[in-house]
Amino acid sequence: MHLNFSSTNQLNLLGDEGANEVCIANISPKERKKRLDFAIRNFVFTSVLLIILLVLDAHPLWRLALFFPLAASTSSYFQWRDKT
C-alpha cells in the first residue's frame, strides 16, 4: 500500500496524486467529429440490421453477431465523449 500525504495534511491511501487534475484532450476536434459520425452511422446500421432480423424471425444466434458493430459504435461514442 502506498501512503501519500497531501499538502492539506490529509492521508491519501489510494495514492491517486493527480485525481484533481484536468484532462486535456489528446485528439483534434476533427478527429472527434469523425468518431462521433462513425458511432452514429454504425449504430443506425446495427439498428436496421436488428429490425430486419426481428422481422424475418431469424434465429437468435444471428442477432448475437450484432454485438461487434454495436461494441465498436459504443467505443467510438465514449472516445468522442471523453475526448480520448
Image (cartoon, rainbow, N blue to C red):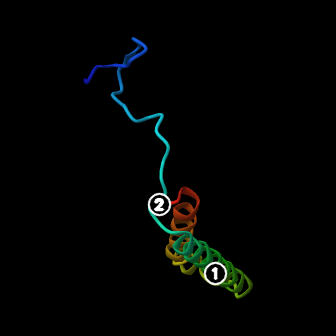
Give the percent coordinates (x, y) of residue 28.
Answer: 50, 69
Query: What residue lies at 55% left-to-right and 75% top-to-bottom?
Result: 30
Instruction: Name the disc covering residue 5, or none.
Output: none
From the viewer's perspective, is residue 27 above or below residue 13? Answer: below
> Of 44 and 63, which appears nearest the observer?
44
Residue for badge 1 = 41
Where residue 2 appears, as percent x and y from the top left, is 26, 24
| Spatial separation of the CA atoms under disc 2 and disc 1 | 20 Å
Q: Which residue is mark 2?
A: 84
Direction from residue 72 to residue 9 in the image, left or right: left
Q: Nearer the viewer, mark 2 or mark 1?
A: 2
User: Label 2 amino acid?
Assistant: Thr
Where is residue 14, by image quadrant?
top left
Looking at the image, which is closer to me, 75 or 22? Answer: 22
* Rendered view: 68 above or below 80: below
Question: In the image shown, does 77 or 44 lie closer to the viewer?
Answer: 77
Mark 1, Cα crowd under 10 Å, few <14 / some 14-19 / many 20+, is: few
Q: Quadrant of residue 47?
A: bottom right
Q: Quadrant of the image for the N terminus?
A: top left
With 2 as the anchor, is 10 left or right in this view?
right
Q: Amino acid at mark 1?
A: Arg
